[in-house]
Amino acid sequence: MSECMNFTEGEFYQGHFDSRAYVKNFYSCPRGHSDEKDFLTFVLRCLSGVFSKGDHRGQRLIDVGSGPTIHSVISACEHYDEIVLSDFADNNRKEIEKWLNNQEGCLDWKPILQHVCELEGKSLSDLEALLKQRVKKVLKCDVRLENPFYPHTLEPADCIITSLCLEAACKDIQTYRGALHGLTKLLRPGGLLVMVGVLGETFYKVDEQPFSCLRLSQYDIEEALGGLGLSVHEFNILPAKDQNNSVSDFEAVFHLVARKPSD
Ligand SMILES: C[S@@+](CC[C@H](N)C(=O)[O-])C[C@H]1O[C@@H](n2cnc3c(N)ncnc32)[C@H](O)[C@@H]1O
């Protein structure tokens, strides 16, 4: 059952989302939050599986709804020259900027970077430097808009990644479908969409603050993608391990890879 009375949309994140607590609780080590068991290692392994072989590459990659995080683009950064990170909430974008500029007190992504280095046989300092060099912009976005980057018009991307954003941002399935449409329009024909998300979740908590989540099934997502003409190439699911989870009620975490048709 949902712990939130009203769906917590972007404006609520702007005022109530504690970026630093979020990263501390969910991303301070590769195992992620202890209540969520193998959630984060699964995500990092899937993203590494997609990108580390170097089969997918291009000029531009956009991560939509990055929050204060950078983990979703670590494995991809070697293969895309320009990476844009983005989020609705100012504080989240500020934390990323602080990290990019090595400012005092910035978030520490070394444990997560180190884990990806171990998966891919890379050096921590090289990978961290490359990632910081490849991230060119951190932009405001709103996935509820037809153009999520309005008033900016971005060049078509070769790849879009989005992790745990759409189900947090969209209060109903119509809004979710509209948001996916907006993301698809940012992709070049033949471009790649990589998504990480949760199935069956209605809320998650950052410290004691609950946030809503749109309860989705695999069918909902595949139907939405199919309706936009995208072909799904991979749909990986890790079911939640047990019921003793105080920070969220997800039934499974998923990772998918889809492609926009070529013109
Ligand atoms: C659960 S966090 C996910 C953050 C990160 N991508 C991750 O994988 O951990 C959800 C994010 O969605 C963002 N968000 C909420 N509403 C949004 C909207 N309308 N447009 C863009 N981002 C939004 C929030 O600010 C928050 O950073």
Image: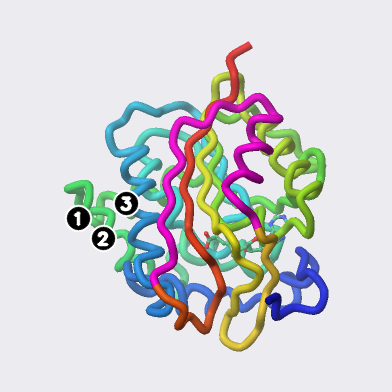
Mark 1 or mark 3: name the one nearer the start of the chain.
3
Ligand 1 within 8 angstroms of badge 1 C-beta: no
> Residues under labels 2 and 3: Cα distance?
10 Å
Magenta residues span 216-241
Ligand 1 within 8 angstroms of badge 3 C-beta: no
- Label 1 residue SS: helix
> Residues under labels 1 and 3: Cα distance?
11 Å
Which mark identifies residue 45? 3
Q: Which residue is mark 2?
A: 115
- Nearer to the camera, 245 or 75: 245
Label 1: how many Cα within 10 Å (few below 14, some 14–19, many 20+): few
> Residues under labels 1 and 2: Cα distance?
5 Å
Label 2: how many Cα within 10 Å (few below 14, some 14–19, many 20+): some
Which residue lies most toward the left here?
121
Q: Nearer the viewer, mark 2 or mark 3?
A: 3
| Label 1 with label 3: CB-CB less than 8 Å | no
List x then y, in percent, for residue 92: 61, 66
Give the amino acid at mark 1. Answer: Glu
For ligand 1, give the image quadrant: bottom right
Label 3: how many Cα within 10 Å (few below 14, some 14–19, many 20+): some
List x then y, in percent, for residue 9: 77, 65
